[in-house]
Image (cartoon, rainbow, N blue to C red):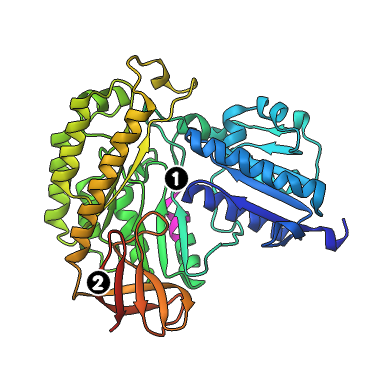
Amino acid sequence: MPRRKKNVYLESLGCARNLVDSELMLGRLANAGWNIVQDPARAHTIIVNTCSFIESAIDESIDTILDFSAHKQNGSCRRLVVTGCLPERFREKIAKTLPEVDCFIGTGAFDKIVQAVEGVPIASGCLLPDPNLTVLSEPSVPRIRSVPHMAYLKVAEGCSRRCSYCVIPRLRGKQRSRSPEDIVSEARLLIESGVKELILVAQDTTSYGKDLKGSSGLGRLLEKISKISGDAWIRILYAHPESIDDNIVKTIASGRNICSYFDIPIQHASRPVLKRMGRSYNQNDLLKLFDKIRSAVPDASLRTTVITGFPGETDKDFRDLFSFIEKVKFDHLGVFIYSDSKDIPSHKLPDRVPKNVAKKRRDRIMSRQREISLENNRKHIGKVFDVLVEELPEKRLCIGRTRYQAPDVDGITYIAGELREGSFASVKITDALEYDLVGEAA
């Protein structure tokens, strides 16, 4: 293939874990001589790495695929490849509904991306090996990061839980933790390359190591990574209420460069709803957990996500959830409306909640959360925080994040002053918005 035709563009959809897969695929392609371009109009091959966790993600994936397929008629694109959770979920049926696509590869075949892009024949146009048999990534595998100063570090793949609303175990397999040596080695490489914030992710991050013989778990792993450099922030996302143990909380409390940030999706607070979801904790367990975190880490920032409209959710169940949110006063909170599908266990549950009711419940929670978030943010006025500067949209205006704000899912910090992108700066908070902070370089 002539060099001018070896341009490839990749669109990554979905979560941070998906982004890691995308960056690893780009690394393999660059190693094979492909040029990574930022404009799909210049690409000979376009890749869409998809998400199919909920209905809206499926719709976004399909719309994106159809949008990019236009480049095959009107542009230089000659090959369209779809990867990730969408083909893994819908298998060979997806090839019949999207004839515009030349090749589909599932979550267990990311290491075959070069063959898929270069047109190596694949039976039925789909490569869908068992995700449980995939080899976990190694530090030596090349990776092209989308952001130079921040990186997600995947510590495990898959999930061994059986939440009734979730399809992830079928798409990603059982939990398979990477070895601590591999993770620490990759963390060191990333920090040495200039990464200022390292974010540990998995489907159930706080269950890291439970499938490894002799593993001391996430707490010990955090300690090892935090010692690589005292200057880089370490953050964890996707904790689980049942697997975040005392050692993890203690390690975060004592780690100077570990962000005092606890992302713990609870999904609900009503005992009957949690039971139908397949979650074995209750509201009292959650209150004890958050009290323990705030006692051990007084400046802790708490984030969670919840679901409204789960089958059987009554008005009382919703009131219990609403009351719980008012009691805990999370710093950051997101709400999903229950997404039904025939291939998840909760589809068989009775007493469906009308979508308009689920939406009203979501809107009511988010309206209250805006008030709670503003109240919490106003407490920061007058304080000085370290901020990681991420954008310079105009002269004397910067955008960054404190250690209490995770990328993409939380608010941001606006900073008046001349600062360098990718650097840390001391910022005095002068104002607070519903989700964002405003400050000036101290």
Name the foreground residue: 90 vs 152. 90
**Residue 181 belongs to the span the image colors magenta:** yes
Above or below 36: residue 208: above
Above or below 77: residue 284: above
Residue pointed to by mark 1 = 156
Residue pointed to by mark 2 = 431
- In magenta, the rendered stretch is 178-184
Give the residue at x 48% y 48%: 17
Amino acid type of the residue that numbered disc 2 sits on in the rendered structure: Asp
Which mark, by number, is residue 57? Answer: none
CA separation in Å, label 1 and label 2 = 39 Å
Where residue 56 sits: x, y (%)?
Answer: 49, 37
Q: Quadrant of residue 277?
A: top left
Where residue 248 sits: x, y (%)?
Answer: 25, 51
Looking at the rendered structure, the number of numbered marks drawn on it comes to 2
Q: Main secondary structure of the magenta part?
A: helix
Name the foreground residue: 349 vs 33. 349
Give the residue at x 13% y 44%: 327
**Residue 348 belongs to the span the image colors magenta:** no
